[in-house]
Amino acid sequence: MKPWIRRGLAGLFAVLTLGALAGCGHHREHAGWGASAEEQARHREHVIDRVAGRLELNEAQKAKLGVLLDKLHAQRAALAGQPSPRAQLQALVAGDKFDRAGAQALVARMNSALETRSPEVIGALADFYDSLDARQQAKVREHLQRRRGWWRRG
């Protein structure tokens, strides 16, 4: 192999390896599935402060927003209590045929987790929204109109 090809391939390999290591080593503080209780509390307060700043919420409205966030967190925790989706899918395709009954049971468990918590979430959302004055409600509607999907954050 010619030396310039060998050097080029070695350089490409080094760049790809360093890029992969940098991507894996990137850590961002988040309040996701694996966040500690302190990170979740800090994220909750950050969300309340941000929404309160944009909508000019009073203390009663902030309290209702906190209740809504707690209900959402409880629903999310109920879903997180399920085994890993990857492991569940692997179990469905472990045999020579797709496990249709297992898939139906999986969907039923997820629906059950959603259905048991959804009325509480809807009630908390309704309480929060109803506590807003007309100007604040208009801001919420405007924000929802402006926002059109995941990649166009507004």
Image (cartoon, helix red, strand yellow):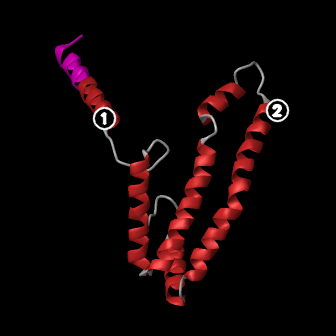
- Density class for disc 1 (Cα within 10 Å; few <14, some 14-19, many ≥20) is few
Query: Left or right of 23: which side holds 131?
Result: right
Question: What residue is rendered at 57% in x and 75% in y?
Answer: 128
Percent x, y of residue 143: 49, 75
Q: Quadrant of the C terminus?
A: bottom left
- Tell me, yes or no, if residue 89 can be seen here: yes
Q: CA distance from mark 2 to mark 1?
A: 40 Å
Question: What residue is rendered at 39% in x and 69% in y?
Answer: 50
Q: Is residue 28 magenta?
A: no
Q: Quadrant of the N terminus?
A: top left
Kindly indicate whether the residue at mark 1 contacts the one at mark 2 (C-beta within 8 angstroms).
Answer: no
Question: What residue is rendered at 30% in x and 29% in y?
Answer: 16
Query: Left or right of 7: which side holds 135?
Result: right
Image disc number at residue 101: 2
Looking at the image, residue 143 lies above or below residue 26: below
- Density class for disc 2 (Cα within 10 Å; few <14, some 14-19, many ≥20) is few
Q: Amino acid at mark 2?
A: Ala
- Circle count: 2
Q: What secondary structure is the magenta-colored segment mainly?
A: helix
User: Picture quarter containing residue 51?
Assistant: bottom left
Percent x, y of residue 9: 26, 21
User: In front: 29, or 151?
Assistant: 29
Looking at the image, residue 55 lies above or below residue 102: below
Q: Earlier in the sequence, mark 2 or mark 1?
A: 1
Percent x, y of residue 100: 80, 32
Q: Secondary structure at mark 1?
A: helix
Q: Secondary structure at mark 2?
A: helix
**Most extreme residue toward the top, as rendered?**
1
**Most extreme residue toward the right, as rendered?**
101
The residue pinned by badge 1 equals: 25
The part of the chain drawn in magenta is 1-11
Looking at the image, residue 114 lies above or below residue 97: below
